[in-house]
Image (tube, grey):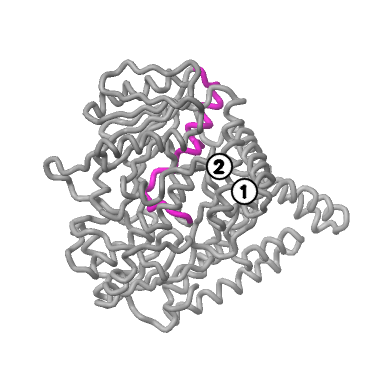
Amino acid sequence: MSLRGRAATGPTTGDPTGPTTGDPTGPTTGDPAGAPPPLPAGYRLRFDPRCRRPRPEVLIGGSPLRVLRLSSPGAALIDSWAAGRPVGDDAAQRSLAGRLVDAGVAHPIPPTPKGTTLPSCAIVIPARDDQAGLSATLAALLLRAPAIPVHVVDDGSSPPLTVAYPGVELRRRAEPGGPAAARNVGWRAAVADGAEIVVFIDAGCVPGIGWLEPLLAHFSDPTVGGAAPRVVCRRDPATPARLACYELRHSPLDMGPHPASVRPGSAVAYVPTALLALRRTALEECGGFRESMRFGEDVDLVWRLHRAGWRVRYEPAVTATHPARQTYRAWVLQRFRYGTSAGPLARRHGRAVAPLAAQPWSIGTWLLVAAGYPLLGAAVTAATAEALARRAKGDPVVAAELRRLAVTGTIGVGSATARARRRAWLPVALPAGAAAWRWCGRRTRLALLLSAVAVACGRPPGGSADDRPLDAETDGCPPGAPGDRLLGLADDLAYQAGVWRGVLTERSLAALRPRFRDGPPRRRGPWRGLARDGRQRTGAFRRTSSAARPV
């Protein structure tokens, strides 16, 4: 079964605390060296609502976005899965389903567990100086997961934390070591007690009703190493009203309403450990959390799991709530600390942390616009669109889609570049803009002025007009309010200050470098040969002379 789709576009998330839009004209090979593992038989597939199918033989979607050209058998198989038929036992079907899931074209629906087939699990709660948050989390767990063992790790609190709930095991660390060290103590104790799945929950986080079973069901796939729910902000009476409204729509913990495969280059590049379930063998293989990382240790672990070949699923049908910071000062400090993780993450994961993913021709287009030559930039975009359309080999539907994606992708790079300037490049962009203002002509000055306005008035990180939080919490918080723009600017600037602090600490500019080739880093895993053999057994996808070349 050959899945050699034309990858023509794709969002990517390099920012560890919020998504950035990549270059939708960026290339991704249709047949990467590290093929994804097959999906188990019995799973059903739910195709992503953002996917399009202009005709039966063409499927457009995924993350990064790609255009898949289907043969007749492949189209029939897609139709049967879209109608609710489960994946069969055939190795070729399972391999194709695995490719669609990992590409983000479809999302797996695990079979309903029969009887008590869910794996054994335990809950780990790291906490420091947050007695009220710990009590709120334990009270919720007592109601919604009463039979699950709970391990609380007090990371050097002063005064020490207390637990008044039966069946909760409390461990104390004499000195604070950070969240990573506390979680490592907790999961090792849970594994020693026989837990196969370890669920990490931050103090103050409250899981929703019926939260556990849907997460554990994903672990019926032996290649799934982690699963996470959607974590939304919860109003706190002590939080200023304007700040609470902003956090309800733009929390860095909220990964949005769409399920996803979590990996660098995906629409959901990471998930926080505010609530995260991990398989014991995956934790042991990766060695747990890096205790040398004070911030970003959860992003680092998720990316190491992916590189080791494990799947991590984001399941927004399951929700949990987390309180917002209670003061503006604490909120700004939180964003600053998140930014400091970019340097250590870039040293360990390279291009996955790039503030911008774009192709050279898209960057060149916007450089021409910034220099005051918009017509020349439009000509470059038109030429790029036509060059991409030629890859369709005479297929008018695919050619039209590639032209459209080239244009919309280049437009998207403009907003992504403005966002990168707000969150990473401002200390360099300001003196460069001042020099250009002094030495360049009126046309360039007008372009620079418009560019500065676009940077200052950019949309706040996270959230969107079509992504409302789930319940009545948002009453009195209209989207797009002027206060959101100001808080969004403060959010980005605080994060940027942290990025530069991390860059100076690491003595490396890796966290500031753009990535000129879109798509996720290759993964390694033991399923490579099996998946390759399965893809060769059937002709679900057409083999064309252009399939071996990236768009």
Q: Quadrant of residue 500?
A: top right
Circle 2: residue type: Pro
Circle 1: residue type: Arg
Give the percent coordinates (x, y) of residue 371.
Answer: 76, 61
Residue 7 showing in the rendered view:
yes
Residue sitting at 48 percent across and 48 percent down?
Answer: 300
> What residue is pinned by disc 2?
461
Q: Quadrant of residue 50?
A: bottom left
Q: Nearer the viewer, residue 371 or 152?
A: 152
Q: Is residue 138 left or right of residue 548?
A: left
Give the percent coordinates (x, y) of residue 265.
Answer: 48, 57
Query: In this view, which residue lies farthest toward the front?
Result: 174
**Above or below 497: residue 526:** below
Q: Nearer the viewer, residue 248 or 163?
A: 163
Q: Residues within 10 Å of mark 1 (few under 14, many from 20)?
A: many
Distance from Cα at disc 1 to Cα at disc 2: 9 Å
Give the percent coordinates (x, y) of residue 516.
Answer: 59, 64
Find out whether the residues at labels 1 and 2 contact each other: C-beta distance under 8 Å. yes
Check disc 2 and report its element: helix, strand or loop: loop
Q: Is residue 230 left or right of residue 14?
A: left
Q: Is residue 382 left or right of residue 269?
A: right
Residue sitting at 53 percent across and 41 percent down?
Answer: 293
Q: Is residue 11 magenta?
A: no
Residue sitting at 35 percent across and 38 percent down?
Answer: 188
Q: Residues within 10 Å of mark 2 (few under 14, many from 20)?
A: many
**Above or below 348: residue 165:** above
Span colored in magenta: 238-264
> What residue is pinned by disc 1?
419
Q: Nearer the viewer, residue 492 or 472?
A: 492
First in residue order: circle 1 vs circle 2? 1
